[in-house]
Amino acid sequence: MTDWTIDRAVEELLRRERERQDGGRITDQWPELDLATAYRVQDALIDRKRRAGENIVGVKLGLTSQAKQQRMGIDSPLTGWLTDAMTLATGEAVPVAEMIHPRVEPEIVFVMGRRLEGPGVTWEQALAAVESVHAGFEIIDSRYRDFSFALPDVVADNASSSRFAVSAEGFAPGGLDLVGEACTVSVDGELIHSATGAAVQGHPAQALALAANSLARRGIAVEAGWTVLTGGLTDAVFVEPGRTVAVEFAHLGSLTVTSG
Ligand code: OOG
Ligand code: MG
């Protein structure tokens, strides 16, 4: 028998975030934590943040590319919540002093024009519900030591989410080749990672369809106006004071990540 509960897991993860202190896997102490229960922890954690004044502004996908799956040792995509408290304005420095061990990863971002409700959503239907496509990045900051977790741990931890930024300029999806869209990540001018949109489930709209279909199992739709992070195209890089990370897309635009 375990003395872990959904509430205790929420308390523990919120405490680690507040105190900037990572810790061991919850599944080490609570091996019965399965995926369905982990999503209940995630939802309860976001409910706590909403009661503290945060508002849901969208959803993120995680582990949608092979680069991310290989690095984290988990081959299954997942979803998490985005709130307004996580948004960084373009050019705003990443507040690393408030974080544990932040990493940045490039993301193709959708802003939804229409509500998208699974199950059975295809990538074509998903793309048709998108209003605009943007360059973006996510700052992930796992509440687990060394970003070491099993799938239920990271689901409970709202998919390591911390902050995200989205370029102001958006593009209509119809005119874009999202499979061929090239992306590079450089640190202080040195190329570190590159990929194309195909890295994200073959097409970023496949990731959006996956989000709609998996959220549908919990009775949730992707709402009009929501922002959707489709998942890192490449492995993430550490955000460190004094270094500048550039996330550059061939057609969607570029963003600079500095820390402050
Ligand atoms: C989990 C979150 C992954 C992505 O874009 O793949 C993620 C992690 O890597 O800590 O956000
Ligand atoms: Mg991400």
Image (cartoon, grey):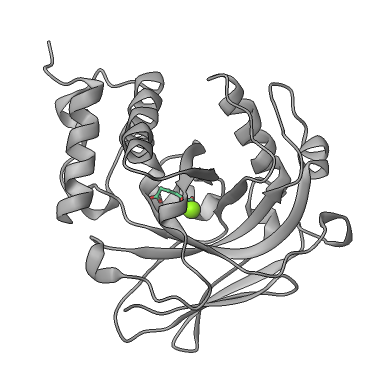
Q: Position of residue 185 (x, y in %)?
A: 53, 74
Residue in the foreground of this view, choosing between 188 and 116: 116
Reply above or below: 84 against 215: below
Indicate the position of residue 10 as horizontal and vertical percent values.
24, 32
Q: Position of residue 26 (x, y in %)?
A: 20, 33
Using residue 164 as the reference point, say whether residue 46 is left or right of it.
left
Q: Can you give x and y, in whole percent of width and height, for residue 173 in the image?
A: 82, 55
Quarter of the figure with residue 114:
top right
Horizontally, is 247 left or right of 103 in the view? right
Instruction: Identify the residue shown where x is 35% and y is 77%.
Output: 259
**Residue located farthest toward the bottom when viewing the structure as drawn:** 189
Which quarter of the image is occupied by the C terminus? bottom left
Position of the N terminus by quadrant? top left
Query: In the figure, is residue 49 to the left or right of 182?
Result: left
Question: In the image, what residue occupies the spot 48% across and 63% down?
Answer: 105
Is any atom of residue 60 visible in this view? no
Q: Residue at x 67, y 46 (%)?
A: 225
- The answer to whether residue 78 shows anywhere in this view is yes
